[in-house]
Every structure is written in structure tokens, then in C-alpha cells.
Image (cartoon, grey):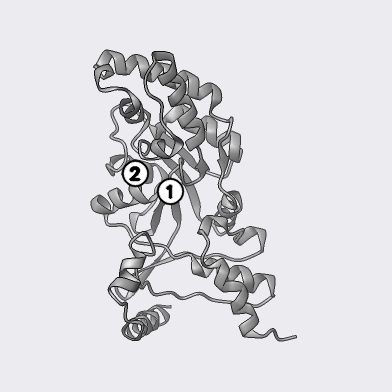
Amino acid sequence: MRRNFSDLWKRIKPLSRRSATALPIGGALGIKIKLFVLRGSSFSVIKTVLFDLDGTLLNTIDDLADAGNWVCEQHGWPTFTVEQFKHMVGNGIPKLVERFSPADARTPEQLAATLAEFTARYDAHKEDKTAPYQGIAALIDALNAAGVQCAVFSNKADPLCGKIIEHYFGAGRFVLVRGSRPGVPTKPDPTGVYSLMQDLHADPASTLFVGDSETKAAIEAKCAPDCVEMEGAAVSQVAARNGVPCVILRAMSDNADESGYEVLVVKKFSIGEYIKTATAIVANMIEAL
């Protein structure tokens, strides 16, 4: 029986407003996934996806905040809210420790001692409240089923990364798990990313990095990577549930991030002009096939 398109759209529209990580797409629904990135009139098939850890695969902020506040309490230092800790993380644990330490407790010797305290406390309690974001495991399984190799690259200490990934995702989902190592600059410096891609034999032109907004912004400034859209996942999900084959071809209209309101509303985005541009881009994609 043919299903009414307007009924399908009613189901698709609310799904497309959610985070892509909340969608149980791919292997869970039997969807065959291919990721493409368009560059000019040509496009690349995505073969490798690198994931950040904290704030991308796992919601770790509560355990990080608890460990940080425990250290602060031991020294009689001011403590912080979880919201305040969200603005301290993202550049590795040594930098986090420096940020929650008072100004008069930041000598190299004191920071080293505080880092040891924090690391021991966090390692013992890193699984108290931490959990994967909804739909992440299914997403990784879908990418693996599609032949896309997945890896993790984090500013968290390398030994901790391996333990955490194995605990929450088991073995086999990620080809490599890489954390912060001595002598290698942390993100957003691209040195570690390029080293990881080399170990994976990954072509930068067919590799995506998925991370939080601040990390993405810093990496974009240094590496100029491409973007990924999420509405196609919502369309594929609904199509799969209704037994309707679909092919998704997309042209990007904006960055779909925190600047979206300004782009679409304040600057009065022209949908008419975008349609012409998008049509030309999609036509080039079809010709390239």
C-alpha cells in the first residue's frame, strides 16, 4: 500500500530537529549508509570517521566535575557548578586542572601534584555518572556495517581513553582509540589527528572528524574540514520504517550551528537563491555518479 507523503513528512520534520546522535539509524533499521563530501563539482566517499570522546561519544561532564570539586574540597579551594566545568574542559586534563586551581596554586610543582590527585580520583570514579549519548552505539554499528572505519581521538590521557571506550562500547567498534600522549600537542593542534590518520592509512579527503562545537571551531580554523548534515538520517529512518527506498542528495545552506539564527533570520536568508544554487550542486553530484 502506498503511504501518503504528507504523513511521512509529519514524522520526518520533528526528527530532523533533534541531534543526529539521538537517531537510532543504520544497522538498527537495516539502512545501507554511504557518506559523501562534495568539493566543487566532485565528491569523496567517506571511509573514516574520527570521534572526539568527551561531549561527543560520552557525557562525562558530571564525573569530571565531581572529581575536580573533590580535589578543590581537599585543599579548601572554591568549588564550581557543572555548568562552569563545561567551560573548563576541552583542552585536556592538565589544562582542566590548571583552570580549577586558584591562581596562587599554579606553580609547576603544585599543578603536577594536583594533576596526580585529580587523575587518581577521576580514574576511581570515572564511571559513576558517565554514559554514552543516546543512539551513539547504533550509529557506530551502522558505520561499521557500511565499511566505514571508526576511531577515537581525545585530549584525555591515552590510558584512560582505552579503559573508558572498552567499558562503554566493548571491543571491536573502534579500529583505534588514541588519547593525549607525551610530546604530542593536544587538539585543536592537528598534529595528533594527522598522526592518527597515518596509522589508520586514512586519506584526509575521505575522513571526517566529529566533535563538540568549541573543538570543531578551533579545528576548522587550522584544518578547514568539511561539514556533515543530519536531516538525511531522519529521512532515512522514517523511510526504512515505512519500507520506502530512498537516496539522499544534500546541498549545504549554512553551518547549522549556533550561528544559524543570525544566518537564517537576522540576515534574512534567501531561500529562492539557495534553491538555484542547491539545484546546480545536486545536478553536479548526479553527473559525477
Image side of residue 32 versus residue 151, left or right? right
Image height check: is 37 above or below 136? below
Visible residue check, residue 171? no
Using the numbered discs, state the Cα–Cα distance from disc 1 to disc 2 in whole angstroms.
Answer: 9 Å
Q: Which residue is rendered at x = 28% and y = 41% of the image?
A: 191
Q: Where in the figure is residue 167, as x and y percent of width and height? A: 60, 34
> Where on the picture, by quarter, is residue 101?
top left
Image side of residue 99 versus residue 152, left or right? left
Q: Where in the figure is residue 181, as x and y percent of width and height? A: 35, 29
154 and 126: which one is in front?
Answer: 126
Q: Where in the figure is residue 92, as x and y percent of width and height? A: 36, 33
Task: Please name the residue that numbered disc 1 is placed on.
Answer: 50
Q: Amino acid at mark 1?
A: Leu
Q: Which residue is rendered at x = 57% and y = 54% of the image?
A: 139
Q: Where in the figure is residue 70, as x and y percent of width and height? A: 47, 21
Q: Quadrant of the N terminus?
A: bottom right
Image height check: is 222 above or below 43? above
Task: Please name the residue that numbered disc 2 is placed on.
Answer: 193
